[in-house]
Amino acid sequence: MSRIGRAPISIPTGVDLTVDGAHVSVKGPKGNLSRSIHADMIVAREEGTVLVHRPTESRMHRALHGLTRTLIANMVTGVTEGFAKTLEVYGVGYRGQKQGNRLVLALGYSHPFEIQPPSGMEVTDLQTFSATQANEWLSTRFTIRGIDKEALGQFAAEIRALRPPEPYKGKGVRYLGEKVRRKAGKAAGKGGK
């Protein structure tokens, strides 16, 4: 059996999980989430835990077993603790600021990007920095918080795609702790006449 799929999901106090056929709903202190799961997967509640079972040992059911368990576990974690993803803006003249609930990013284009977070998400902990190293500038760091892990990751990826880090100077938007592979620049000149 799948090591991930067979692990029970503990339901904390204050969280209400309901299963209606192939539809799972979770209500908790931070909000409500619902999701449709594959109709073949069997979700069973037992005394404060939830177990996911698969009907056969086919390749598809084995793959869906761990996926379904992880999706439900992420819903439970989301409504109790929530998820967060931190992004950093590197580059001279690149900066970010909040205007109301919107995030405004200047990323070296002729216009700033005004980004409205989807419902259930917010941009917090916006910090502005000065020079950190001789040729790298960390200008802004901000955190996106939400209860839906999948939607949060998609929103962070869309922000990063506005200006992905480039390999020569490392300028752009990156995740906190992301390693950017750097390339050597062009040689200064041709030797010889």
Image (tube, helix red, strand yellow):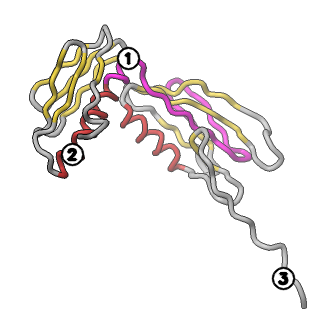
User: Which of the marked residues, 3 or 2, is nearer the chain's N terminus?
Assistant: 2
Vertical comparison of 114 with 83: above or below: below
Give the spatial CA distance, label 1 vs label 2. Answer: 28 Å
Residue sitting at 61 percent across and 40 percent down? 177
Outermost bottom residue: 193
Q: Position of residue 93 (x, y in %)?
A: 72, 45
Residue sitting at 56 percent across and 41 percent down? 175
Q: Per the image, is 87 magenta?
A: yes
Q: Nearer the viewer, mark 3 or mark 2?
A: 2
- Number of other residues with Cα within 10 Å of mark 1, as a class: few under 14, some 14 to 19, many 20 or more: many
Vertical comparison of 185 with 127: above or below: below
- Residue type marked 3: Lys
Residue 55 lies left or right of residue 121; in this view the side is left
Q: Position of residue 64 (x, y in %)?
A: 22, 43
Quarter occupied by residue 22: top left
Q: Position of residue 164 (x, y in %)?
A: 56, 52
Residue sitting at 69 percent across and 63 percent down? 183
**Disc 2 marks which residue?**
62
Quarter occupied by residue 132: top right
**Disc 3 marks which residue?**
190
Range of magenta residues: 76-104
User: Which of the marked residues, 1 or 3, is nearer the chain's N terminus?
Assistant: 1
- Residue type marked 2: Arg
Q: Per the image, is 12 magenta?
A: no
- Residue type marked 1: Thr
